[in-house]
Image (cartoon, rainbow, N blue to C red):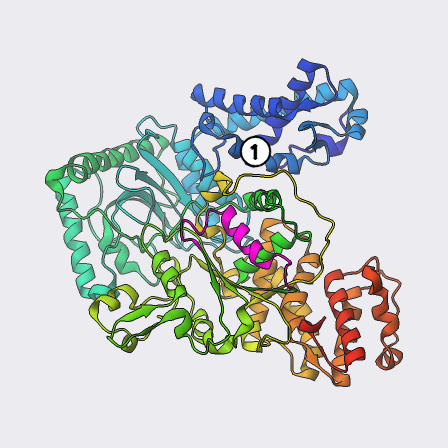
Amino acid sequence: MTLPESIGQIFRKKQKSYKMVLILSLIEELKSTNQERAAFDKVKERFLGYYIQQQDNGQRVDETPSRYPARWRELTKGQLNTILTTPVKVLSEMLSVDPEDNSIGFKPEVKRQLGEAGLSQLENLAQEELHEYNSAMQQFSLKKHLENIMEHYVQAKREPFKDHSLGTLLRRTIPSELRALPFLNEEYYKIQGSIGQGKWADVPWFSILDKRITSTTQSGEYVVYLFAEDMSAVYLSFAQGVTITPKEKGSNDKYTYLRNKTQEIRKLIPLTNMNKDENIQLLGHGRGKDYQASTVAYIKYERGKVPSDETLIQDLQNVVEDYRIYVEEHVLNETASTLEVESVTEYIESVLEPIEDAEVPSILHHIQSHIRRQGFFFPEHLIENFYLSLKAKPLVILAGISGTGKTRLVKLFAEALGATRDNGQFRLIPVRPDWSDPADLLGYKDLSGRFQPGPMMQVFVEARQPENRHQPYFICLDEMNLARVEHYFSDLLSVLETQEWREGEIQTQALISPATLGNPEDERTYGGLGIPENVFLIGTVNMDETTHPFSKKVLDRASTLEFNYINLQQYPQEAVQAGDVPAELAELNHLFVRSDYLKLADAYDNYQELVVRTTGRLVKINALLEDIHAHVGFRVRDAVCFYMIYNERYGLMDEEEAFDWQLLQKILPRIQGSHSSVRRVLLSLIKEATGQGTSLTFNMESLMEDASPLYLAWAGGKTPLGLKHPQSARKLAYMLRRLEEDGFTSYWLS
């Protein structure tokens, strides 16, 4: 028989060998037991055993995720489960996993379709595809890779960033192949590459770092291949970082320091056949002077003139040998302690083991499982929505009736990422009704002239410490609107708007003015301190007669998640010990949550169609909102577009569902009033939100007089079928009911 096309094509698209190995592991286990289904743990053992055996035999295999041990045999059970989440999901049309008995097998309809003959053919197909994949992996040509990047990178920057083949090449393929070179012992060397973080870098690169002096391109010296922005050449460089910033020493002092250090390093090691001048040219703009001053030595390979693989490997071996001499004889040796090892790279875009887009869904699944094991349940896709909202803007407001788990969601989400009260990465700050200015949060100067930090400032100071700057910190402002947010939170709202990229990080203006700091010690601790990029702010609010409403200034700068629809018939799952944090999640750095874009221009080239499509929706909505002076500006447009882009990158929800969340969170909270124009806007929006596939009818003239036939469709917890944006439609229906019953409506009164 011939395999059905849907099955015969399952290996057509592949970036890893996981699918082939999983299918083979399952078939082997089914054969050994002669059962219809297999124990998933046994299949996992076979899956892991394949990679361990290949790696032990010196064969190149797919790397483990970057935050996991490099050796497959060192993986924990939890880490293996996370790795298998993706292939199981991709093959979900063929395979099914039963969590009750922890079994895996082909779906009954697939089993019937295949039969014994088809199963044998599928096994042969998987073996052939795996053999072809492995053969390609063993063929290492550095020349081919360098030429490929220089030929295609400029064009690639006009294409979508997500899952691009050049990203796989620089981040995965090249590092994996270089590790097989005998002089790059993985005990000492860490190899990584980058094309940027969420957007294309001007200068892509891959580096070799000696783990004895540095584990990141943000510190120490290392060997690095740097590609010129115009792709005219690639430079194999011995690079040093920039230790003293212009702000601290002034430009002249900085470059004097760099050149002196360059000369000192050049005297220490041979640097045979390398150029020792300042003619390295990477960018046609910006920090070219930094490149020239901070590069110790380099070899230039021009596009179209890249030498043979033998020459390239010999050059690399010579540079790595110089690097080894420098590290072992002059950095680790106490007699050379005058050399400063610490450095912060300016010209290489900072990369902290970036989370691959394809890994995000499985990470969120583990976060949700952790929350459920603690006995808490939230509506479908709320965790994904909460995550996307934090990525789009580091200020999120959770609103709803008391007792729905708003504060607990923040705590458990943070806990799943290793941020707890015990380690100081989660801070709950109860808001007091008498707070009237930012001093209650940030701090004040006491009568003695010393600065007394507020609770939020204490977290900011801790989060920016060098050892903490890559750990995520979560601040939960409980009952945020007991006091007027615009009064005590005004400085933070303003400073949030000053976010900009500096040296690969998101930085803001300072929160505390010099006049507030009374002495040099306070200036060292708090001076120049803005909102660190690894701190995320979440507020919880209950909207009732004891609280204050939000102004549009606040709503524009935050995403509002509502917790008003509760299913009480949800019960705890298996109990777990307090503090049971998934270890593999606790190892994530803050880049998992930090924004990748600050301006729409950061993402526009790669997601132009999605941005134009989303903006077109907002333009239609704005035309309606203008009648009641509730229309949105560029800030809201950008935030909505960012949310939609992240959702597409990670493949979390379909586009209509994602836009439903944004309509509910960024548009509807702005609507309130008692005029007929408000009714007209609500009716127009609910018509758009229901779409064409429902039985609801819209006679605008009659509904302007009496809208009850419309909103009663949601009475008793019912929801009409076939709605385009069901959540927004339900909220709009309740707002219409409030308008008719009370003569006034607001997002917050339903």
253 or 387: which is nearer to us? Answer: 387
In which quadrant will I find the N terminus? top right
On the question of residue 394 being in view, the answer is no
**Region rendered in magenta:** 402-426
Q: Circle 1: is it few (<14), some (14-19), or many (20+) Cα within 10 Å?
A: some
Please tell me whether residue 56 is drawn above or below residue 721 in the rendered image: above
Q: Position of residue 196 (x, y in %)?
A: 44, 52
Residue beneath the point at 59% across and 59% down? 406
Examine the image and state in which quarter residue 366 appears. Answer: top right
Horizontally, residue 703 falls left or right of residue 288, namely right
- For the C terminus, give its image quadrant: bottom right
Q: Is residue 540 magenta?
A: no
- Where does residue 33 sit, x and y in percent of width and height? 69, 15
Q: Could you say whether the residue bearing mark 1 is in a helix, strand or loop?
A: helix
Identify the residue position indicated by label 1 in the image. 81
Which residue ends up furthest to the left in the rendered image? 335
Q: Is residue 418 magenta?
A: yes
Q: Nearer the viewer, residue 167 or 406?
A: 406
* Residue sitting at x 42%, y 21%: 58
- Could you tell me residue 701's position as x and y percent? 87, 81
Q: Is 226 rendered above or below residue 620?
A: above
